[in-house]
Amino acid sequence: MKVLIAVDDSLCSREAVNVVASRPWAEGTQFKVVHVVEPIAALYGLVAPEAVSLMLEAEKKLKAHGIKFTTDIGDYLKEIFSEQQVSSLVIGGYIADSVIEQANDWHADLIVVGSHGRTGLDRILLGSVAEKIVNRSLCSVEVIKIKTPKCDETTSKNDRSGASVRQKQTV
């Protein structure tokens, strides 16, 4: 079985990783942790040409941060499963489209994604990545929700270190 875990730096994604980590999986199951960095221009629309270099620099920083926390998640899962069963990847693109493309290219059997639980105006303005993945994916999708409404909070700097992740045995 191949399980693609789509993550961002939120409590929702950490919960999705913890759910995957806590389950028994068939021997030989492979896991791929994927983080997508959206182009900043897509988030803010058209910008002045002089702002392009600033946006590219910001995207580099977002990618570097994504590599750090995705690697931490991969290391956490490698401790539970094995080095050969877990890989991680940071890519650029539109999140739902890129996750689905990765799942298709890798021939994933399951996509696991956390839900931010957005409703109302937030959902209308920001959309639901999880919903898009569910509706467009060719494989099964499991959406993990948490009961706390503060799913968009990111981890503190202390929580981002691999050491503290391992000490708490959660991501």
Image (cartoon, grey):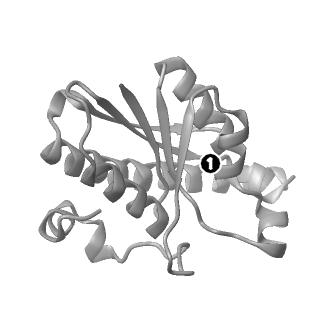
Q: Is residue 86 above or below residue 169?
A: above
Number of residues whose C-alpha sits closer than 10 Å to that of mark 1, classed few (under 14), some (14–19) or many (20 or more)? some
Q: Which residue is pictured at 29% across the width and 62% down the height?
A: 171
Q: Which residue is pictured at 82% across the width and 74% down the height?
A: 120
Q: Say if residue 142 shows up in the picture.
A: yes
Q: Which residue is pictured at 24% across the width and 43% down the height?
A: 24
Q: Please, which residue is most extreme toward the bottom here?
A: 149
Number of numbered markers? 1
- Locate residue 54 relative to residue 66 in the image: left or right: right
Q: Position of residue 30 (x, y in %)?
A: 30, 29
Q: Is residue 102 above or below residue 159?
A: above
Residue beneath disc 1: 56
Q: Secondary structure at mark 1?
A: helix
- Work out which quarter of the rendered image holds the N terminus and state it: top left
Q: Which residue is pictured at 72% across the width and 34% down the height?
A: 136
Q: Position of residue 108 (x, y in %)?
A: 47, 25
- Locate residue 119 relative to residue 62 in the image: left or right: right
Residue 168 sits in quarter: bottom left
* Foreground residue among 159 and 14: 14
Q: Position of residue 58 (x, y in %)?
A: 57, 56
Q: Position of residue 36 (x, y in %)?
A: 55, 44
Q: Say if residue 94 shows up in the picture.
A: no
Residue 19 sits in quarter: bottom left
Q: Amino acid at mark 1?
A: Leu
- Locate residue 155 relative to residue 73 in the image: left or right: right
